[in-house]
Image: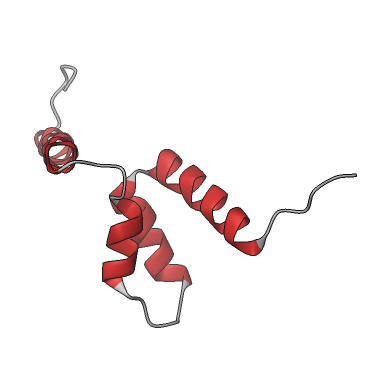
């Protein structure tokens, strides 16, 4: 007999796929556009960064900043 996933399991699986596909920043932007309910940023932040150290968060922010900077400069070399 096949086990039916709970709503929470489906939500968690969907969020993982969304964040992996879009990245953290764009996934949050997407979610903010499609939800009309009040959001608790602290809960979202806890879930988003639950397995990350401060160093991991800093590294990701630095990578994102570098990508944006590269796009602005429209370099022809690989960023």
Residue 47: percent from left, percent from top? 35, 56
Q: Which quadrant holds the N terminus? A: top right
The image quarter in which residue 41 lies: bottom left
The image quarter in which residue 11 lies: bottom right
Residue under the image location 36 percent in, 76 percent down: 39
Relative to 79, is 18 on the left or the right?
A: right
Relative to 41, is 66 on the left or the right?
A: left
Residue 18: percent from left, percent from top? 47, 48
Residue under the image location 42 percent in, 64 percent down: 31
Asked if residue 37 is positioned above or below residue 61 in the image, the reply reads: below
The image quarter in which residue 21 lies: top left
For the residue pair 73 and 48, the one nearer the viewer reads as 48
For the residue pair 46 and 25, the one nearer the viewer reads as 46
Residue 77: percent from left, percent from top? 15, 17
Q: Which quadrant holds the C terminus? A: top left
Q: How many marks?
A: 0
What colouring method underlies this structural image? secondary structure
For the residue pair 16 and 31, the one nearer the viewer reads as 16
Residue under the image location 28 percent in, 60 percent down: 45
Relative to 3, is 42 on the left or the right?
A: left
Relative to 58, is 31 on the left or the right?
A: right
Residue under the image location 34 percent in, 43 percent down: 23
Question: Which residue extends farthest right?
Answer: 1
């Amino acid at each position: 007999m096949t086990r039916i996933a709970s709503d929470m399991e489906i939500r968690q699986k969907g969020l993982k796929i969304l964040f992996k596909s879009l990245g953290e920043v764009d996934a949050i932007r997407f979610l903010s556009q499609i939800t009309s309910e009040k959001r608790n940023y602290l809960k979202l932040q806890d879930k988003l960064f639950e397995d990350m150290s401060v160093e991991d968060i800093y590294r990701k922010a630095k990578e994102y900043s570098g990508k944006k900077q590269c796009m602005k400069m429209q370099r022809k070399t690989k960023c």
